[in-house]
Image: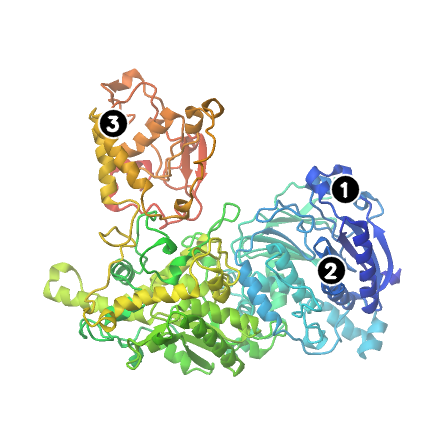
Amino acid sequence: GDDTKFCGVGMMFMPADEELSKKMQAALDELFERNHLEVLGWRDVPIYPDVLGPESAENMPVIKQVVLKSEEKGKALERQLYLVRRRIEPELRSQGIEGIQDLYVCSLSGRTIVYKGMLRSATLRRFYADLQSPDYDTSFAVYHRRFSTNTSPKWRLAQPMRMLGHNGEINTLLGNINWQVSREKNLELEGDDDFYDEDEDAKDFEDRTGKSAADKEKICDLYDLWDPENTHRLVNVCNLSDDQEFEDTVSSAFSDSANLDSVMEVLVRSGKSPIEAVMTLVPEAYEMKAVGRPEIQNFYKYYEGLHEPWDGPALLVFCDGRTVGAKLDRNGLRPARFMRTKKGLVAFMSETGVFEIDEDDEVVERGRLGPGEMVAVNMRRQTFGLNWDLKDEVAARFPYGEWIANQAVDLPRTDYPQSPLSNRFDIPIDGAADPAAMNSMVRTQTLFGWGAEDVDMQLTAMANTGKEATFSMGDDAPLAVLSTKPHTLYDYMKQRFAQVTNPAIDPLREGMVMSLKMVLGHKGNSLQPTEENARLLHIDSPVLHEGDMKTIHESDFPTTTLDTTYPLADGPQGLEKALGKLAQAAAIAVMNGAEILVLSDSKALEEDHLGKTTYIPPLLAAGAVHHRLIAEGLRMRASLIVETGQAWSTHHFACLVGFGASAVHPYLAHQGIRDVVRKHNVKVANNPKLGEPMDEGKSLSNFRSAVDAGLLKILSKMGIGTLSSYMGAQIFEAVGLDAEVVDSAFRGTPSRVGGLTLRDVAEEIGMFYSRAYPDVLNAESEARKRLENYGYVKFVPRAEYHHNTPALSKTLHKAVRAASDGDYATGVDHYSVFMESLSGRTPTALRDMLKLEADSAEPVPLDEVESVESIMSRFCTGGMSLGALSREAHETLAIAMNRIGGRSNSGEGGEDPARWGALTDGDLEEGSCTTGKVSPMLKNLRSGDKAASAIKQVASGRFGVTPQYLRSGEQLEIKVAQGAKPGEGGQLPGAKIDEYIAGLRSSK
């Protein structure tokens, strides 16, 4: 009857302990009553546990339903049930009830009931008796089958969630969580409770509002439109960030799907339609996709300043009981198909053919979703909406374009100034200052951790080509925490990468879905669309120059510069104090109205501070301020710009943005490029054979292009499309930092091994200082005339240790050559020296620190140990392509591994089909191949040898991948990100490409 409009049903997973379950039920009854909900009854949901597997059965909760009655209905009822559900956990905690973690509310709604569990998809209907009952009718169903990929399977984590079914991964999860925590402390809605209720008849509507039935029909046509005059007060009467009253909206303890679902609920319960909510959280690449649709573009531009995207490959199916629909993320990497039949059935699924339609029905419309597209059914209107129709309706709700035109500011991309616009950045270049001068370029770069390789191999390449320098693959230098040389803090952060279930993006061929755009300023209340919220400063690149900084300081956006230096006299212990002082100053500045904070270490270059001041590492400063503002509920009110002399590589910029910076002004990198250009041009003027002169403006612009391209590459490897969602996402692992450092600035970042404390970090900066000012610290020392070559990239005597040294290689070569010449005794001697060098070498990786404590263990009898042949069958070589290795080396590895029963890896360069067959006596003459199956340079071959690589590598279908190539392998290895994208891996120098290699790679 009509009473059902006032009822809601809760689907509960409760503890298996009967007494605990009863105690919780009693507490819930009290909570419901206090919140004006009448408990009509509890129901044990009928189930068939015998269909479960052993693990599911062992962890199965008690499943109950509670039926509640309210004086509210429609949206008001949904909001009431939502708020009381959010109060359940704090209520039980306040009563000291244990086992809260075993209680989970699958749904509490008057419109939806969620049946789910830790079971196979085919078992769901057999497990729940309700789903087999002919009396159980519904006009819609969301059925989502998904394997748990990045969390351990649990009953509560089964899909769908309360409002979403999510197939994919949210790569920016930690950042999204941090931003949502910050956002909740700044949410509020104004207005009264005079919102439209579609369940209300015309007379009740007129009595309640004083408006006519015609007005109701008008509002009815705009059901999905959110009107400030017809909204409700969700947040200004309920502080959702108060953990004493409400459970957390988001948490790192939740899965990515659960967190996204929870934020979706906040938006929908606050008055937005599910369609608008999902457009806000998972926006498309609107500048390319919505061409010719200015209203939709303006909607997305408005919200990109208020809501960072939840980024990652995702297919979302959403439902609030009135609207059910589906949307793909901006990359569109998940299959998504829909169909509509003549009888009114609308189906959406990953693949066609999931089910059969009635014989007397027929399909009248079918299609698939592309990147960022969506479809939806409005069950009240009984209409089916396609992508642009749905988005047009949402975008027409408010004059977003007018607001943006009136309020938004775009920072124009201007040419680099010919010289620094401030004395602070006017570091003498081109030998204009004696090396002994306190502000010389060598001193300044050394102070901020620069080495000769950074200028000669990185900065110069970026200035010349507009791209990052190309290095060989692999890194045989020690981790920063194991190094005896000083390192910048960036070196302790290791980037994380996408996994196979979460593919990377191609930043070249798929660049249309990627963006480096950022917004600066006070990000307003996203629940209340207003013109004021559009007042933001938009930038195309996070790399700023002196002219940009001048424009920002002179803009209408209140900007405060915070000094990140501190007196050298404070000693290593001064870093912790300076860090706390900086974070406090940032909070005070924002409370006083600052909308842009500039964290600057340039004070160290001022005349009165030269040689007397040290600095907080910019990464530490940015992270500390970012997290302090989050904790204070101030983060949405200001953006961070890092102005530093310690940023020159793309990894540095990625770290700074990843830990909260919106933009970076790398003033020393810019001045360093000017120095490189002018020195080069002086040399060219004296000797034209050295090349063409460099253009200073072009070189500076190239540097920014190189950083931009490098950031896109880094984003793409994690499957992230926008820098705005990467900001604050902390997609790194700290290797070698103590919990003290992580808690100070990188909270939430994995750090599994400990390492440097804040004092250690300060002392490492001190090592740079001692190299920058040796003559200041010791009168008998001389000023450095050139940058130190730390040897981090290339082996340099007396510099950084490298695992692969020329001396070590020579020893191995001597051993191999002696044995090849038949002098096995000498070969063994050399090999022994080689092995001793390996066993006594300096640790370079964490595994080198492991020690097997087997001295006191009893020997294992050989007959209980695997045979040599069995062990060797698991040996594999690394993936190295023919071209990276010579033909002879590549074939030798393959033959050797095949002889011992192991597996060699072809690498991504293709493979000669002639190698796929075994050698016969007819192919050989005195141990060498004469028929071309392998290189004639190989010796000591024998009949039966095979040069085919057992593991065939595939990199995005390029480089000689053919059906025959794939069939010839025993195992396929698919490269993701590195090597699979243009310009990443496979960067073979042109001089090494001959006709044979080009043919194998099918090059044209």
**In the rendered structure, are the residues bearing label 1 and label 3 in contact, judged by CB atoms less than 8 Å apart?**
no
Check disc 2 and report its element: helix, strand or loop.
loop
Left or right position of 302 against 161: left
Q: Identify residue type, mark 1.
A: Phe
Label 2 to label 3: alpha-carbon separation: 73 Å
For label 3, the residue is 938
What quarter of the picture does the C terminus occupy?
top left
Q: Is residue 394 above or below residue 54?
A: below
Left or right position of 921 against 141: left
Q: Earlier in the sequence, mark 1 or mark 2?
A: 1
Front residue of this view, candidates 411 and 27:
27
- Dot in front, 1 or 2: 1
Q: Residue at x 80, y 52 (%)?
A: 64
Image coords of residue 181 (percent x, y): 59, 67
For label 1, the residue is 127
Front residue of this view, candidates 483 and 172:
483
- Number of callouts: 3
Q: Earlier in the sequence, mark 2 or mark 3?
A: 2
Question: Mark 2 Cα within 10 Å, few/some/many (few <14, many 20+)?
Answer: some
